[in-house]
Amino acid sequence: MQVKLFDFEHEEDLEEALNDFLATLQEEKIVEVKYQVAVADNSKTFDTVFCFSAMVVYRSS
């Protein structure tokens, strides 16, 4: 079994990369896909940082 990790600041970038990777796998090789969003605020600069990530667990053979 193997994992592939994805991490992007924009959800559209994650979606595109994840779809591109999944298209390279046969459906029966995919074990699980996990998705997570994290948000952090910087009170000094008033910036909000988003982190969109996913992990694909798949069978390599």
Image: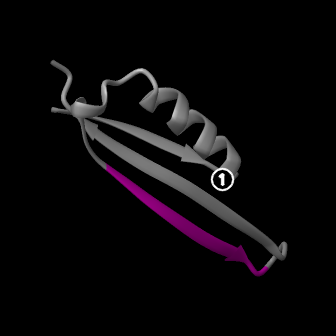
Residue 9 at least partly seen: no
Which residue sits at x=44%, y=50%? Answer: 54
Instruction: Please say whether residue 60 is visible from this viewpoint.
Output: yes
Query: Which image quarter holds the N terminus?
Result: top left
Residue numbers of the magenta segment: 33-43
Direction from residue 55 to residue 1 in the image, left or right: left
Q: Residue at image x 55%, y 68%?
A: 38
Dominant secondary structure (helix, strand or loop) of the stretch shown in magenta: strand
Q: Where's residue 31, x and y in %? A: 22, 43
**Residue at numbered disc 1:** 11
Residue 12 vs residue 22: left or right? right
Of residues 35 and 7, the one drawn nearer to the viewer in this rendering: 35
Relative image position of residue 21 (x, y in whole percent): 46, 28
Residue furthest out toward the bottom: 43
Q: Which residue is drawn at 42% across and 21% down?
A: 24
Residue 2 magenta: no
Q: Is residue 14 left or right of residue 56?
A: right
Q: Looking at the rendering, which quadrant does residue 15 occupy?
A: top right
Give the colouring mode of the picture.
one colour
Indicate left or right for 61 with 18 as reference: left
| Residue 35 included in the magenta stretch of the image | yes
Answer above or below: position of 50 versus 53. below
Residue farthest along the right direction in this orientation: 45
Image coordinates of residue 33 in percent, x first then y, are 35, 49
Q: Which amino acid does label 1 sit on?
A: Glu
Is residue 57 positioned above or below 41 on the image?
A: above
In the picture, which quadrant includes the C terminus? top left
Badge 1 density bin: few <14, some 14–19, many ≥20, Cα 10 Å:
some
Q: At 57% across and 34% down in the image, what residue appears?
A: 17
Q: Is mark 1 on a helix, strand or loop?
A: helix
> How many marks can you see?
1
